[in-house]
Image: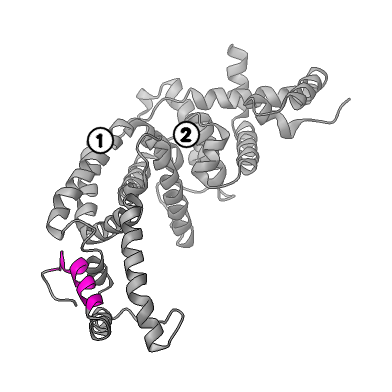
Amino acid sequence: MSPHVSDRLSEYMDGALGVQDVERVRAHLDTCPACLQEYRGLQDVQQLLRGLPAPHPREGFMERTHWRLARAAAAHPARARFLSGLREAFAVRPFRVALVAGALVVVALPIVWMTGSMGPREVPLDSDAYVRHYVMLSVDRPLADEATSTFVSSDLPEQPIR
Amino acid sequence: MAEAVSSLVLGGMTVSPDAAEPRTAHRLAAFEELVLRHQSQIYRVAYRLAGNHDDAEDLAQEAIIEAFRAFDRYQPGTYFDRWLFRIMSRTYIDTVRRRNRRPTVSLDAPMGPDGDPLVTVMGDSKEDPQQMTEAVDLDGTVQAALDRLPEEFRTAVVLADIEGLPYDEVANVLRCPVGTVRSRLHRARQMLREALGPHLRGRRGSR
C-alpha cells in the first residue's frame, strides 16, 4: 500500500493540492480505510463549523461601539491629525513633497558646505530646534530666509511653540 | 513638542487645526458606515475567537477602535472585513498573552482535576435548560472545543471554515506564510475531530 496521506487530507479537502498530489491521495484513500476514516472525520468537522448558527450580538452592541469609538476618536484628535497630516503630505501628494524636499536640499546644501561640516548632523529636536534652524538660514542666506518663511508661515500655529 | 514642530513644518501642506474636527467627524462617519455594513461578520469572528458574548463584544470593539486609528491605511475597494480581521487577530493574540501573564481564577468556570474547564464536559451552563435545543447544545459543544485549541490554530480554523477565507487570505490576515496556514488548519481540524468524535459519528449515522 502507498504511504499514508494524513498530512495532505486537509489540503485535498480544500482543493489546495496539485493534480499529481490529488491523484496520489485519491488512489490511497481507495485502499486505506484508516486514512478514509480520517478524511470523513475532517469533512464532518468542516460541515459542522460551516453550519454553526450566527451568534447575535447583545442588544445595543452597535450603540455601545459607537460611543466607545467616538470617545476614542475625541481622545486622539491631535495624534490623528498629526498622522493624517503626515500621510497626506507623504502619500497623497508626492509631487509636492518632492518639491519641498528639493527646495530644502537646495537651501541646505550651500550652508552645509559653508560651515564645512559635510554629512548629516545629529540635531536634537528640542524646543529650540526650529529657531536655531531659522536663525542659521537667515544669517547665512537672506534669500533662504525668505524662501523658508514663505512656505512655513502660511499656517503658523496660534500658540507659541512649547 | 515634536507635534508642534511637525504641525509647523507641515503647516503649508496639511489642513489647519480648525479644519481638523469636521474632518475627524467625516472620517468617523465613513468608518462607522463600513463597520455597520460588516457588523455580523465582525461579531461572528470575535465571538468564535473569544468564546462568549462578554469577551466577544470587548474584542470586536477594541479591534474596531484600532481599525479606526489605522483607517488612513485602509484602501477603499478592498475587503473591509478582512482588513479588520487582520487587526482583530493581533488584538486577540495580544489580549490572550496579557491574560496569560496575569492568570485569573474564575468562579464561573471551575476547573477539572487535570486543569481542563468543566464547562467543556457540561456544556454552557448559562443557557436556560428549557431553551436548550439540540442546535444550541451542539453550538456550545463545538465552541467549547474551539476554545481549547491554541490561539493560532483557532484563528486559522475560524477564518477558513467559518468565514470561508481561502488559504492565502488567511495567511494575509495572520501575517504568516501559506504553508503555516496549511499545517495549522490541518492540525486544528484534527484536534477538533478528536474532541468532537461522538458528535461527528452521531451526525454521520443520522445522514
Percent of width and height locating residue A24: 79, 24
Up/down of A141 relative to B95, above or below: below
Query: A45 left or right of B71?
Result: right
Write down the quadrant of residue B83 in the picture.
Answer: top left
Where B101 falls versus A72 (above or below)? below
Question: Which quadrant is home to the C terminus of chain A?
Answer: bottom left
Query: How far from the left and from the top, in percent, is residue B176?
Result: 57, 47
Q: Please tell me whether mark 2 sits on a helix, a strand or a loop.
A: loop
Q: Residues within 10 Å of mark 1 (few under 14, many from 20)?
A: few
Give, as a three-letter code, the residue at label 2: Gly
The three-letter amino acid code for the residue at tag 1 is Glu
Q: Could you tell me which residue is drawn at 49 percent across and 30 percent down?
A: B162
Task: Write the start and end of the magenta stretch as one range.
Answer: A143-157
**Residue B33 got which mark?**
1
Give the vertical position of B144 relative to A1 (above or below).
Answer: below
For image coordinates 67% across by 22% down, the residue present is: A40
**Label 1: chain letter:** B
Q: Quadrant of the N terminus of chain A?
A: top right
* Residue B92, x across and y down, in percent: 44, 49
Query: Given this view, does label 1 or label 2 mark the residue nearer the observer?
Result: 1
Rounded to the nearest angstrom, the CA distance separating label 1 from label 2 is 37 Å
Residue under the point 39% across and 27% down: A54
Dominant SS of magenta comes to helix
Q: From where the camera sits, is residue B196 visible?
A: yes
Q: In the image, which disc is placed on residue B123?
A: 2
Among all residues in the image, which is located at the extreme right?
A1
Determine the chain carrying the residue at label 2.
B
Q: Residue at x 46, y 46 (%)?
A: B89
Query: In the structure shown, which secondary structural element does the residue marked by tag 1 occupy?
Result: helix
